[in-house]
Image (cartoon, helix red, strand yellow):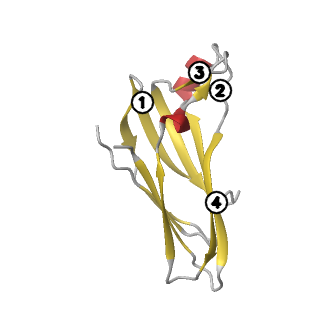
Amino acid sequence: MTDQIVIRVTNSGLTTGDCVILVYHSVGDELRKSLMSMHPVPRASLVAFFRIADLAPTAFSSTHCLPLTPSMLALTTTDGSKRVYDGRHVISITTGDPREAPTTLAVIVHKGIVVTIQGTAQREWSDECIYVKGRTNLDV
């Protein structure tokens, strides 16, 4: 079974609106330090995004399930191949609004397998998209 990130978005405004959800991957500080001598490590990489169009106010919400795939956690090596490194990875979910901090989930990889996902994140955003819930169904 593939782990899932469940994202629910509710429009808190008074009018119908659109919302774009951005999902980024980054590696933890320890992993970044150990890899920097081997190849460049980006601060964050956009790994998924989706647009919710015409989301009606308050009474309606939209739920999206994103599979947490190995490609979302992979880094590009010096020879151009992709590799998932053991260690702490971070998935950040945001609307891209610079006034709001992203919702984050910590993902621990050991021997190439996701072994732990830390944090069920719930938060409210002050703009149109107010509710993001990250949840994983971990089958190890």
Q: Which residue is drawn at 34% across and 49% down?
A: 137
Check disc 3 and report the residue beneath it: 33
Q: Position of residue 21 (x, y in %)?
A: 61, 58
Residue found at x 66% / y 76%: 17
| Residue to which mark 2 is pinned | 41
Q: Residues within 10 Å of mark 3 (few under 14, many from 20)?
A: few
> Which of marks 2 and 3 precedes in the sequence?
3
- For the residues bearing labels 1 and 2, Cβ distance under 8 angstroms: no
Rounded to the nearest whole Å, what is the CA distance between mark 3 and mark 2?
9 Å
Measure how far apart labels 1 and 3 are at the Cα level: 16 Å
Q: Quadrant of the image for the N terminus?
A: top left
Q: Which amino acid does label 4 sit on?
A: Thr
Foreground: disc 1 or disc 3: 1
Is disc 2 placed on a helix, strand or loop? Answer: loop
What's the residue type where badge 2 is placed?
Val
Determine whether 119 is above or below 25 in the image: below
- What kind of residue is marked 3? Lys
Q: SS for tag 3?
A: helix
Q: Indicate left or right for 100 with 85 as reference.
A: right
Residue linked to disc 1: 109
List the residue tagged with mark 4.
95
Please indicate whether residue 1 sits to the left or right of residue 24 in the image.
left
Front residue of this view, candidates 122 and 10:
10
Marks 4 and 1 sit apart, C-alpha to C-alpha, by 26 Å
Does residue 38 sit above or below 75 in this rendering? above
Measuring from the top left, give residue 107's x and y in whole percent.
Answer: 44, 38
**Element under label 1?**
strand
Label 1 crowd bin: few (<14), some (14–19), many (20+), radius 10 Å: some
Q: Sequence order check: which comes first, mark 3 or mark 4?
A: 3
